[in-house]
């Protein structure tokens, strides 16, 4: 069976295009995963530092942490008023049990802000 010249030219180009798109999608996914892991490690390092620090956390320190890490912070001490770096007041803070079982170097579960 003989294929026309149109198919002999378009099929390899189509396969090449599919391969390029597939490689691009895979590369973007790997890059996004690595960036997410890097950011999580940075936030984990900030959290580790604060757990070992011998000073009392206040709003100024939280805002400096935010500017260094790019993350928003919510600190809710057991005996005081919560400190936060985000503007919204509507925060669904997870139950304390969720923090205990999460155990990721002081980084707790996700808190929902304004839904």
Image: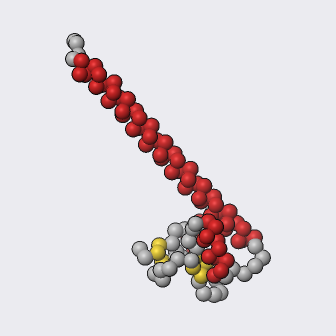
Q: Residue furthest top?
A: 1
Colour convention? secondary structure
Residue 81 versus residue 88: which sits nearer the camera? 88
> On screen, 6 above or below 71?
above
Residue 35 versus residue 10: which sits nearer the camera? 10
Question: Who's the residue at 52% across and 47% down the image?
Answer: 31
Residue 75 versus residue 93: which sits nearer the camera? 75
- Residue 79, by quadrant, is bottom right
Question: Who's the residue at 48% across and 47% down the image?
Answer: 29
Q: Would you say 56 lies left or right of 59 here?
A: right
Q: Position of residue 107 (x, y in %)?
A: 61, 67
Whether residue 105 can be seen here = no
Image quarter in which the N terminus is found: top left
Image quarter in which the C terminus is found: bottom left
Q: Would you say 18 lies left or right of 5 here?
A: right
Q: Residue furthest right?
A: 54
Residue 102 versus residue 8: which sits nearer the camera? 8
Q: Position of residue 73 (x, y in %)?
A: 58, 73
Image mark count: 0
Question: Who's the residue at 51% across and 51% down the image?
Answer: 32
Q: Position of residue 46 (x, y in %)?
A: 67, 66
Question: Who's the residue at 63% across and 87% down the image?
Answer: 80
Whether residue 24 can be seen here = yes
Q: Residue furthest bottom?
A: 80
Q: Would you say 53 lies left or right of 16 here?
A: right
Q: Would you say 17 lies left or right of 95 here?
A: left
Q: Position of residue 61 (x, y in %)?
A: 67, 77
> On screen, 7 above or below 94?
above
């Amino acid at each position: 069976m003989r294929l026309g010249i149109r198919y002999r030219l378009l099929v390899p180009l189509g396969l090449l295009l599919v391969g390029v798109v597939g490689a691009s999608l895979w590369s973007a996914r790997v890059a996004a995963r690595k960036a997410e892991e890097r950011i999580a490690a940075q936030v984990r390092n900030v959290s580790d530092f604060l757990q070992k620090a011998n000073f009392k956390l206040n709003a100024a320190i939280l805002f400096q942490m935010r500017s260094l890490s790019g993350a928003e912070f919510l600190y809710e001490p057991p005996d005081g008023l919560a400190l936060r770096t985000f503007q919204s007041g509507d925060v669904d803070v997870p139950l304390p049990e969720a923090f205990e079982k999460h155990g990721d170097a002081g980084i707790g579960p996700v808190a929902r802000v304004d839904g």
